[in-house]
Image: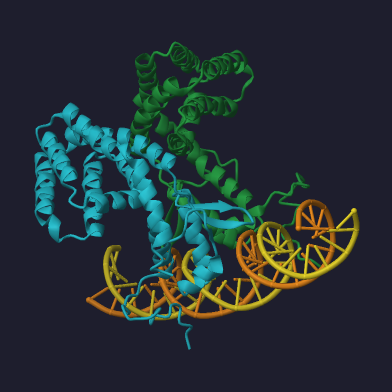
Chain colours: A cyan, B green, C orange, D yellow
Amino acid sequence: MLRPRQSNQDNNAALASKPIKTGPRVYEEIRRMAMDYRFKPNERINEVALAARLNVSRSPIREALQRLVTEELITFQTNRGFFCRGFDVDEVVNLSDVRTVLEERSVRLAIQRATNEELAALVDWWTITMARADSFSSTELTARDEEFHIRIARLSGNPELARMLEGINTRIHFVRKIEVEKHRRLSTTYTEHSEIARAMVSRDADRAARLMHDHIAISVADAMSTVREGLARIYIDVGQI
Amino acid sequence: MLRPRQSNQDNNAALASKPIKTGPRVYEEIRRMAMDYRFKPNERINEVALAARLNVSRSPIREALQRLVTEELITFQTNRGFFCRGFDVDEVVNLSDVRTVLEERSVRLAIQRATNEELAALVDWWTITMARADSFSSTELTARDEEFHIRIARLSGNPELARMLEGINTRIHFVRKIEVEKHRRLSTTYTEHSEIARAMVSRDADRAARLMHDHIAISVADAMSTVREGLARIYIDVGQI
DNA sequence: GCCGTTTCTATTGTCGACAATTCGAATTTC
DNA sequence: GAAATTCGAATTGTCGACAATAGAAACGGC
């Protein structure tokens, strides 16, 4: 009889009948955990425990972790193992600074290269999103916020630029989510996004870039308090094992 | 008797007595190979062959490769394995575009935050390097070129910015080396670096940023021919197995 | 009671084995 | 002759085993 490569009747319940390769699955799962700080900052990550938790051996775990190391979501020390990344204000501020210049370049290129249809589609999509905003959970809202920026990055026609922004996004995902939940309504973000999109439609690069700059600066302004809030959540929510 | 974890009398000769951990060593080694296109573009990388070549098992090989995947030096497809990254003009151009905005930000921040001593040290170091230029091999020359930019990035006081620039540097290392060898004298690069450094000392941010911008633009200008030259080298030099 | 050793335990690093998949070549079919 | 098929060899995915290392605990000297 063949060895069951992946016990499809997994953990506790059945979203079975999903023939997802375990390699990628494990990677995605750990990545998600790291993004959401399911590991405490600087916590040492026990490979065997994690392997048991995900019903696999240590090999795929280690490969996924190594990959996350270069994504800066995980830290690694030889002979000591893997650790969760830290969580501090400086990092958020520094990332935001980089993000600012990349996003500015992003809008400028998008304005230069995107078609009228593409830009119109961006506006439409965001308008619809705004209209439905109340029906979205914080998680969904955060995802839409991130998607707005990613769409622009894609329109820039520079995949490398887009990839780097995505990398930054995954690293600041947690604080961004906190921000969304803190304000909840997000109305300022909404109007700011709309303004940016409209500036893009009218091909006003300078204005769009400036709006984008300010848009990011605002959230950096109270990064301190956001991080504080984030730390509280990390160490208070023990809802998940 | 203990199992010899690593046959220290390696491949063919003896740089033995080096108790370097095999994990990091393997990673560095493969990384170097990828940077220099010792693998042909888009070539499939055979794990067992590579493992045999480096005298280790497949586990450390795979971990290193996974790590290089997020560095964009290696590509990966489930069930099909690892591949060398491609080698085309678009990528170089796109990376250079990103690099430009990051380097501009880098000088600006460095001018803002670096001390007089630090900037003076930069000028001095580059002056000395220029003086010794003739005694350097192309490889050493390339390294100095890269180091100049990295030093500025460090002076920016933003480690994230520096890290991203380093990432870009490793990806364009090959073409940069070609450029260095193509011009050999490098005199323009030399004077350009000097000018940038001097502008930094006089805290002229706009000028420094503009110089940096042009400095990079120049090499992008004939990226096409450089890449062509690079392709030739990759497929002609069969010096290494 | 505190600091430096020593011993023991938990965890990581690497390996070889084997199943699952893919690749390539030979073969057949149209 | 070209395209599809089949089958065998090569390669990848994952596992469990065990040595080497680090970390904790017990011990002893002061």
The quadrant in which residue A156 appears is: top left
- Which residue is outermost to the bottom? A1
Q: Whole-percent x and y of residue B91?
A: 36, 39
Badge count: 0
Q: Whole-percent x and y of residue B78?
A: 41, 63
Foreground residue among A81 and B71: A81
Q: Whole-percent x and y of residue A173?
A: 33, 51
Q: Which residue is pictured at 28% across the width and 49% down the height?
A: A179
Foreground residue among A79 and A131: A131
Q: Which residue is pictured at 11% across the width and 47% down the height?
A: A121
Looking at the rendered image, the quarter that the N terminus of chain B falls into is bottom right
Q: Is residue B145 above or below residue A65?
A: above
The quadrant in which residue B165 appears is: top left
Q: Whole-percent x and y of residue B82?
A: 46, 56
Residue B177 visible in the picture: yes
Q: Is residue B180 above or below residue B11?
A: above
Q: Which residue is pictured at 31% across the width and 32% down the height?
A: A101
Is A166 left, or right, of A49 in this rendering? left
Is D24 left, or right, of B119 in this rendering? right
Q: Which residue is pictured at 57% across the width and 26% down the height?
A: B138
Q: Is residue B128 above or below residue A186?
A: above
Foreground residue among B236 and A26: A26
Residue B79 visible in the picture: no
Q: Is residue D25 above or below residue A35?
A: below
